[in-house]
Image: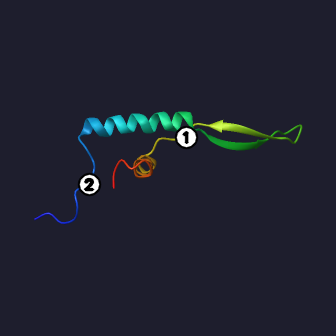
């Protein structure tokens, strides 16, 4: 007996393709951190690589309507 509606998840190959899309999204959209220059006192924006995580991948899937 199945309860609830089926999920939209596809086969492992489809998940792998979605993960590759997520990886490219993370590479193309880095986080920005503001650093204070010690001598001049200026605030300098520094790009930081966005970490890949299971939670982030899950959120990305939901934002892009890949799963329910």
Place residue 50 in its image quadrant: top right
Residue 58 percent location from the top left of the image = 40, 50
Task: Indicate which disc residue 50 carries.
Answer: 1
Towards the viewer: 42 or 10? 10
Residue at 44% in and 47% down: 60
Comes first in the chain, label 1 or label 2: 2
- Crowd rating for badge 1 (residues with CA inside 10 Å; few <14, some 14–19, many 20+): some
Give percent across and percent down for residue 6. 22, 57
Q: Position of residue 2 (x, y in %)?
A: 14, 63
| Front residue (pair 19, 55) | 19
Task: Identify the image quadrant of residue 39.
Answer: top right
User: Are discs 1 and 2 less than 8 Å apart at CB?
Assistant: no
In the rendered image, the quadrant that contains the C terminus is bottom left
Q: Look at the picture and state if 25 lies above or below 66.
A: above
Name the image colouring: rainbow
Q: Which element is circle 2 on? A: loop
Residue that sits furthest to the left in the current view: 1
- Label 1 sits on a secondary structure element that is loop
Is residue 49 rendered to the left or right of residue 6? right
In the image, residue 54 sits, relative to residue 5, either above or below, namely: above
Q: Position of residue 7 (x, y in %)?
A: 26, 54
Which residue matches tag 2?
A: 7
Which residue occupies 25% across, 39% down?
Answer: 12
The quadrant of the image that shows the N terminus is bottom left
Residue at position x 40%, y 48% in the image: 61
């Amino acid at each position: 007996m199945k309860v609830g509606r089926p999920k939209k998840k596809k086969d492992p190959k489809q998940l792998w393709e979605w993960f590759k899309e997520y990886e490219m999204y993370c590479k193309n959209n880095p986080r920005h951190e503001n650093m204070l220059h010690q001598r001049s006192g200026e605030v300098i924006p520094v790009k930081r690589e966005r970490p890949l995580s299971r939670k982030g991948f899950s959120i990305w899937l939901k934002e892009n309507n890949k799963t329910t």
